[in-house]
Image (spheres, coloured by chain):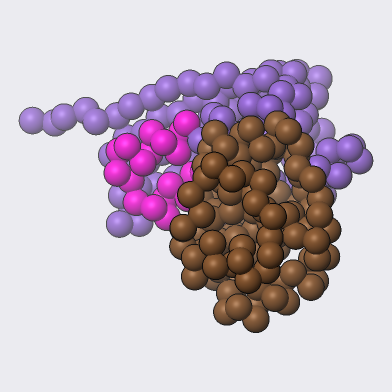
Amino acid sequence: MLVDNSEDGIFFLTGKDFTNAGTASSSLKAVLERRGIRQDIIRRTAIAAFEAEMNVVIYAVAGMMKYRITDTEISVTIQDMGQGIPNIELAMTEGYSTAPDHIRAMGFGSGMGLPNIKKSTDSLVVNSVVGEGTTLEFVIQIKDSQ
Amino acid sequence: MELQEIINSLSLEVKTPGLDLHREVTGGYVSDLLSDVIGNANKGNIWVTLQIHLNIIAVASLKELAGIILVNSRNPDTDTLKKANAENIPVMTSTLPTFELVGRLYALGLRCR
């Protein structure tokens, strides 16, 4: 008999709320730890989730992080109501950033966020509409790397 | 090496006195760019930075770093210390600039790993 071990959840994100920034990623990491998922997989998921969460906090009005964990993979969708990305290819370029000076002064906006997400995940899809928002979906395989 | 030994050797000022400082430090990492730390620091590292805002705690917590040393006697925000205590991330300050501080950490035997 097949047992369904999958699990999903959602966290809400608020733009400009630097006080709680990182909370969603920490909570997701805690879920993965509770499930006993391998450390390197947790590490990669946490990196990608944190970068995506910070992008929402820095650039968007609000957003959400949805996750689904199965026996074979972790998939995370981060959807925001924000300014959107006019040129996704450019945004994926390491070092490219549109962050204002006060954000850079905090050590954010170094143009490493999206490249970090791409490096840490097995697949990444970015969809964006300027003036409406951005949706980012990434998947990290569990089974293949064991 | 234990965090407490590093604190004693380098005369660091502990800004989170309530936290247990007998924890193992695996190595060190230096950066003021949070994405760099998120991407490249390792679990158990001590992190040297000049950033003092509260998001450094989220980064340290997520990466399970052993602690944060702020250089040039930079004073952490009150919110930062509150969060540091809540997340169990020791925060220390040094009067030294980054170059001098990291040189001493290296001399103690810490490496980037």
Percent coordinates x, y for residue A90 in the rendering: 79, 46
Percent coordinates x, y for residue B100 in the rendering: 79, 73
Q: Give me the residue at 80% from left, 38% from top.
A: A87
Q: Give me the residue at 80% from left, 61% from top.
A: B95
Front-most of residues A91 and B73 = B73
Percent coordinates x, y for residue A94 in the rendering: 75, 55
How many numbered marks are there?
A: 0
Front-most of residues A139 and B39 = B39
Q: Give me the residue at 49% from left, 70% from top.
A: B1
Image position of B108 (left or right of B69): left
Front-most of residues A76 and B95 = B95
Whether residue B29 is in magenta: the answer is no
Task: Say if residue B49 shows up in the picture.
Answer: no
Query: Overall secondary structure of the magenta stretch?
Result: helix
- Magenta-drawn segment: A27-50
In the rendered view, tell whether residue A10 sits above or below residue B89.
above
Image position of B98 (left or right of A6): right
Q: Quadrant of residue A88?
A: top right
> Which residue reaches farthest right?
A101
Image position of A46 (left or right of B52): left
Image position of A142 (left or right of B69): left
Front-most of residues B68 and B35 = B68
Task: Check the rendered structure and report the hue given to chain A.
Answer: purple
Q: Give me the residue at 33% from left, 27% from top.
A: A7
Which quadrant is home to the C terminus of chain B?
bottom right
Task: Say if residue B51 shows up in the picture.
Answer: yes
Q: Quadrant of residue A62?
A: top right
Percent coordinates x, y for residue B85 in the rendering: 57, 37
> Which residue reaches farthest left?
A1
Task: Check the rendered structure and report the hue given to chain B.
Answer: brown
Whether residue A36 is in magenta: the answer is yes
